[in-house]
């Protein structure tokens, strides 16, 4: 089995309402931060024939929205 | 400025409906996987007085639900 991780983050220029909500919640708890961004991680397990290129393909096609998100694939 | 990353994943024993949905969508696109798990990443920027211990605290208190999720803090 091969395992890959795809990390998807909102682009810097994109709004990140979830990140703002987390920043606000942390502040109310007394944690002062200067920035919070919230993204997703998808961990995919597949058999040995799966290539990093296929995972890139998945990311482009359904995991991430390239207009507002960037992604990074790593093999675990 | 210091930057930390908190990676939050559903525990293995917890159901992960989002992961199942992604697995299904990938299958419909022709990508056969044996498992998909979907988690969150929170990237936090704060000033130099912020310690990794504080981030652990944030994770325990609001970022993750320790009953059904595990988290990992790394400094970037």
Image: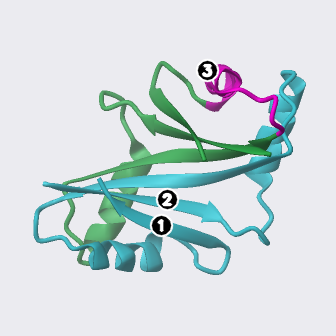
Chain colours: A cyan, B green
**Is residue B51 covered in magenta?**
yes
Tag 2 or tag 1, which sits nearer the N-term?
2
The quarter of the image holding the N terminus of chain A is: bottom left
Residue lying at 66% horizontally and 50% vertically, measured from the top left? A38
Q: Which residue in the protein does label 3 denote?
A: B60
Crowding at dot 3, Cα within 10 Å, few <14 / some 14-19 / many 20+, comes out as some
**Label 3 to label 1, Cα distance in Å?**
26 Å
Q: Which residue in the protein does label 1 denote?
A: A72
**Is residue A44 covered in magenta?**
no
Residue under mark 1: which chain is it in? A
Residue A3 placement: quadrant: bottom left
x, y percent for residue B17: 41, 45
A50 relative position to A58: left or right: left
In the image, the segment drawn in magenta is B47-63
User: Which of the labelled discs sits on residue A7, or is there none?
Assistant: 2
x, y percent for residue B68: 45, 25
């Amino acid at each position: 089995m091969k395992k890959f991780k795809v990390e998807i983050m909102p682009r810097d220029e994109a709004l990140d309402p979830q990140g703002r909500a987390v920043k606000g919640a942390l502040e109310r708890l007394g944690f002062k931060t200067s920035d919070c961004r919230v993204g997703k991680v998808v961990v995919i397990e597949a058999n040995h024939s799966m290539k990093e290129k296929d995972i890139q393909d998945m990311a482009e096609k359904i995991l991430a929205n390239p207009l507002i998100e960037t992604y990074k694939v790593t093999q675990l």
